[in-house]
Image: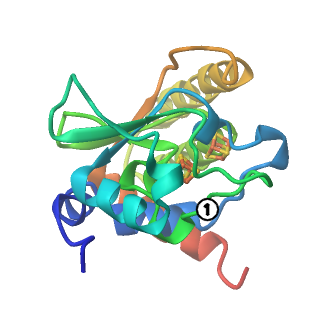
Amino acid sequence: MENVGISAAVKKAVRYDIVQSILRHYECPPTCQAHCCSKGQIHMFEDEMKVLSSLDPARAGKITGDTNSPSLYLMQAPCSFLNDSGRCHVYERRPTVCGLYPFKVNTSGISIGLQPCPVGFLIIRDFALWMMDTISKADLSEEARSRMADDWQKDVESYALELSGFHIKPVLMEMQIPYDDLEMLSMFLGSRNHGK
Ligand code: SF4
Ligand code: SF4
């Protein structure tokens, strides 16, 4: 029961279960080669660090305290839990931040970021499709509908540009998705992919 701690509270606050229900509709392309586990820093809470340490003390030896955030721990990428076949060695017990990616928590408290990695871009595109579908049914003038649809189309194009530089850019423009829209997106994907 070690894993019932701050991470459980954070998971609830950031709608972790809904994010999982969205991510199950997507698959990472093999060409990405676990980019998110190979670059940057992987942050985790103390209870998660303890779980990883108990599962594999040798691999967990690379985890250190985060000098910038005393309550957090971090692993410098490439993550030592990434195995030779590019899979996570502790997938079922991976830290919250790993289970959320390409979603990224921010400090707004009302929305969650979405990085335009290969899978993140597909989600952004589907989110835009859902928004355009919603707009098409809304009680709006034809002109307003067309303007909003154009804006979403431009947004998708700008995230496609971000995707094209994803593997080399140090900072990416993220889409912000209000928490209230996450569940609707999950339902949209569930009904669209029903039976798949
Ligand atoms: S989550 Fe994104 S960055 Fe990570 S392996 Fe999948 S497609 Fe690549
Ligand atoms: S713990 Fe697993 S999912 Fe998280 S960065 Fe390491 S290999 Fe990737």
Q: Is residue 165 above or below residue 54?
A: above
In the image, farthest residue toward the front: 58
The answer to which quarter of the image holds residue 33 is: top right
The residue sitting at 21% across, 72% down in the picture is 4
Q: Is residue 23 above or below residue 143?
A: below
Q: Is residue 20 above or below residue 194?
A: above
Residue 103 point in image, percent of width and height: 45, 44
Residue 124 point in image, percent of width and height: 56, 41
Which sits in the foreground, 77 or 64?
A: 64
Residue at disc 1, secondary structure: loop
Give the amino acid at mark 1. His
The answer to which quarter of the image holds residue 10 is: bottom left
Residue 102 point in image, percent of width and height: 52, 43
**Which residue is the site of mark 1?**
89
User: Which quarter of the rendered picture does the C terminus lie within?
Assistant: bottom right
The residue sitting at 76% across, 39% down in the picture is 32
Question: Is the CB of the residue bearing disc 1 within 8 angstroms of ligand 2?
Answer: yes
The residue sitting at 45% across, 45% down in the picture is 61
Observer able to see residue 188: no
Which sits in the foreground, 196 or 92?
A: 92
Observer able to see residue 169: yes
Residue 122 point in image, percent of width and height: 66, 45
Which sits in the foreground, 57 or 187?
A: 57
| Classed neighbour count for the residue bearing mark 1: other residues with Cα under 10 Å, few (<14), some (14–19), many (≥20) | some
